[in-house]
Image: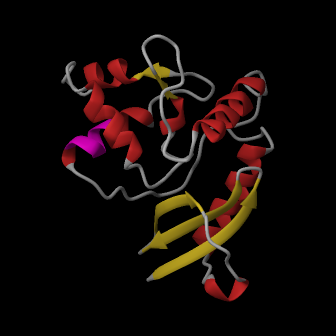
């Protein structure tokens, strides 16, 4: 089964997609949508609640089943991203080393760019070795927003 939910956030409207009991995509919707275009489910409603808690600074981790679609290397990168604690950052180089290929810094960047489950797979937590933001498929303004949101809530004692 395939379901979609559109959810308003400070970033804009998020499109959340579920396939067969797994979240397979969270993206920022760039087109105009109507309520008729969505077909929701209990999992998508749970995702909206958890995303709302995240944006309110009350959630630091997610408890949602996800299914990644990508190459073996991309999935390795995304698995490493899931290990980055809330409010912290690592460099593209750090991730390349963690997946066992220290020279694959650019490939790590490309894998981040292909991440279809933003926020849940926190590609926004990857920065350049120099400390500069680096790129972000949704734009650096959104990356900055997410990093600032997390840093401002790092001391909250919520989940």
Residue at x 79% of width, y 27% of height = 156
The residue shown at (28%, 44%) is 74
Which region of the structure is painted magenta? 73-77
Vertical side of 67 occupied by 41: above or below: below
Residue 131's place in the image compared with 115, above or below, is: above
Query: In the image, is residue 74 part of the stretch drawn in magenta?
Result: yes
Quadrant of the snapshot with the C terminus: top right
Report whether 93 appears left or right of 60. Answer: left
Task: Quadrant for residue 40, please give it.
Answer: bottom right
At which x and y percent is residue 52?
A: 75, 53
Magenta run includes residue 19: no
Q: Residue at x 33, y 42 (%)?
A: 111
Quarter location, residue 26: bottom right
- The number of callouts visible is 0
Q: Nearer the viewer, residue 94 or 153?
A: 94
- Prevailing secondary structure of the magenta residues: helix
Residue closest to the eye, 117 or 47: 117
Which residue is outermost to the top?
Answer: 130
Q: Position of residue 75 (x, y in %)?
A: 29, 45
Quadrant that contains the N terminus: bottom left
**Closer to the camera in the image, 144 or 155:** 144
Image x and y of residue 57, in percent:
78, 38
Instruction: Identify the colour scheme used.
Output: secondary structure
Pick whichever, 144 or 54, lies toward us.
144
Residue 62, given in percent of the width and then of the height, sits at 59, 47
- The residue at the far bottom in this view is 36
Q: Is residue 29 above or below residue 111?
A: below
């Amino acid at each position: 089964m395939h379901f979609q939910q559109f959810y308003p956030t400070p970033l804009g409207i998020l499109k959340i997609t579920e396939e067969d009991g797994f979240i397979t995509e969270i993206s920022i919707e760039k087109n105009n949508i109507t309520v008729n275009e969505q077909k929701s489910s209990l999992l998508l409603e749970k995702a909206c609640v958890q995303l709302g808690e995240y944006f309110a600074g009350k959630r630091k981790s997610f408890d949602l089943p996800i299914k990644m679609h990508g190459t073996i290397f991309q999935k390795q990168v995304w698995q490493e991203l899931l290990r980055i604690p809330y409010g912290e950052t690592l460099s593209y180089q750090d991730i390349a080393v963690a997946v066992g290929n220290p020279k694959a810094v650019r490939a790590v960047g490309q894998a981040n760019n292909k991440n279809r489950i933003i926020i849940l797979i926190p590609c926004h937590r990857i920065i350049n070795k120099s400390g500069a933001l680096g790129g972000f498929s949704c734009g650096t303004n959104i990356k900055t927003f997410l990093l600032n949101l997390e840093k401002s809530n790092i001391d909250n004692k919520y989940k």
